[in-house]
Amino acid sequence: MADNDNSIGAFLAGIFIGGLVGAAAALLLAPQSGEETREQIREKSIELRDRAEVSLDEARTRVGQSAETVRVKVDELSQQVKQKVTPPPGEVSLGDEP
């Protein structure tokens, strides 16, 4: 599960860095006025923010689903352990004294 969290963080960082590099390259290579450049920066930053929010929402959903899956599995294993450890009615457990 820790590897999955690291992968999500690396993915989001890659999206963010890639967006910044792409925006910088576009600004440096495109011949336009300062006002046009500022407007383009505004538009690209809004687009990048929106994509980051979507990615974050998707990551939160996946983490929530994974956490619920783990919680269910832990409950199942806990019940199995309790069944194996608890003696049937009428039997004396090792810790009971007559």
Image (spheres, grey):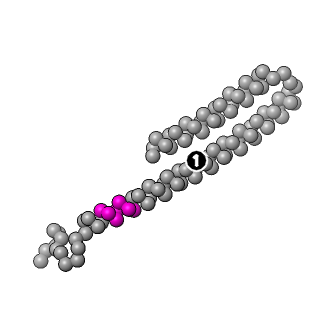
> Label 1, on which residue?
59
Amino acid type, label 1:
Ala
Quarter of the picture containing the C terminus is bottom left
**Overall secondary structure of the magenta section:** helix
Residue in view at x 18 percent, y 75 percent: 91
Percent across and percent down for residue 52 are 66, 42
Q: Looking at the image, which residue is at 39% across and 62% down?
A: 75
Image location (x, y in percent) of residue 69: 47, 56
Which element type, helix, strand or loop, lies under badge 1? Answer: helix
Residue 92's x, y, as percent? 16, 74
| Left or right, residue 98 beside residue 48 | left
Instruction: Name the one closer to the observer, 53 or 73.
Output: 73
Q: Give the range drawn in magenta.
A: 75-81
Residue 85 falls within the magenta-colored stretch: no
Identify the residue shown where x is 22% and y is 71%: 87
- In the picture shown, does residue 95 fall above or below 8? below
Q: Which residue lies furthest to the left in this view?
A: 98
Q: Residues within 10 Å of mark 1 (few under 14, many from 20)?
A: some
Q: In this view, does 20 lie to the left or right of 76?
A: right
Q: Position of residue 37 (x, y in %)?
A: 83, 29
- Is 80 within the magenta? yes
